[in-house]
Every structure is written in structure tokens, then in C-alpha cells.
């Protein structure tokens, strides 16, 4: 599977980011496609535990 920018999952993430930005300030949406979303999930799993990283993925992820 591939989740490129501009597809439904990306649009949902960007819509959520706009709403969250109203509360907490700057939000970055970064697409990490590859291996069915596992590359992005691995990046989030290994990110610092500061409570500011969110993974939005499909059921397969």
C-alpha cells in the first residue's frame, strides 16, 4: 500500500492538523509512505516521548 500526499488519509490528517493548530499552535503533517505505513509507524514509535507526536494511519498500519 502507498499513502501519498493528496489522498484521503493525507486530507484527513491535514484537516485534523488545522483544528489542532487552533489550540496548540504550529502543526506539521509529514507523509512517510512505504511498506504499508510501517516506515511512518516505526518513526513515531522511536520518536522522543514528549507527547507531541501523533500517527494517523490506515487499519493495515
Image (tube, rainbow, N blue to C red):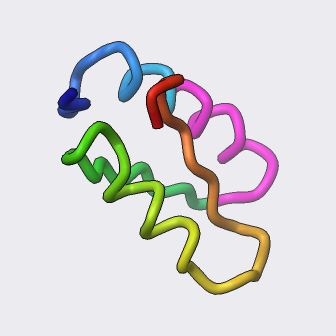
Q: Is residue 24 left or right of residue 43?
A: right
Q: In this view, does 18 lie to the left or right of 13?
A: right
Q: Which of 2 and 23 is in front in this view?
A: 2
Q: How many marks?
A: 0
Q: Is residue 48 left or right of residue 1?
A: right
Counting from the top left corner in percent of width and height, residue 42 is at 44, 65
**x 25%, y 30%: residue:** 3
Q: Which residues, given as a range, are shown in magenta? A: 15-25
From this viewpoint, which residue is outermost toward the bottom? 48
Q: In this view, does 16 lie to the left or right of 60?
A: right
Magenta-drawn stretch contains 21: yes
Counting from the top left corner in percent of width and height, residue 43 is at 43, 69
**x 68%, y 59%: residue:** 25
**Quadrant in which residue 18 is drawn:** top right
Counting from the top left corner in percent of width and height, residue 41 is at 47, 55
Q: Which of 9 and 23 is in front in this view?
A: 9
Q: Nearer the viewer, residue 41 or 13?
A: 41
Amino acid at each position: 500500500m502507498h499513502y501519498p500526499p493528496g489522498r484521503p488519509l493525507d486530507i484527513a490528517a491535514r484537516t485534523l492538523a488545522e483544528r489542532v493548530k487552533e489550540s496548540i499552535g504550529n502543526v506539521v503533517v509529514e507523509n512517510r509512505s512505504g511498506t504499508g505505513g510501517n516506515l511512518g509507524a516505526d518513526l513515531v514509535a522511536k520518536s522522543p516521548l514528549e507527547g507531541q507526536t501523533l500517527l494517523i494511519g490506515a487499519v493495515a498500519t
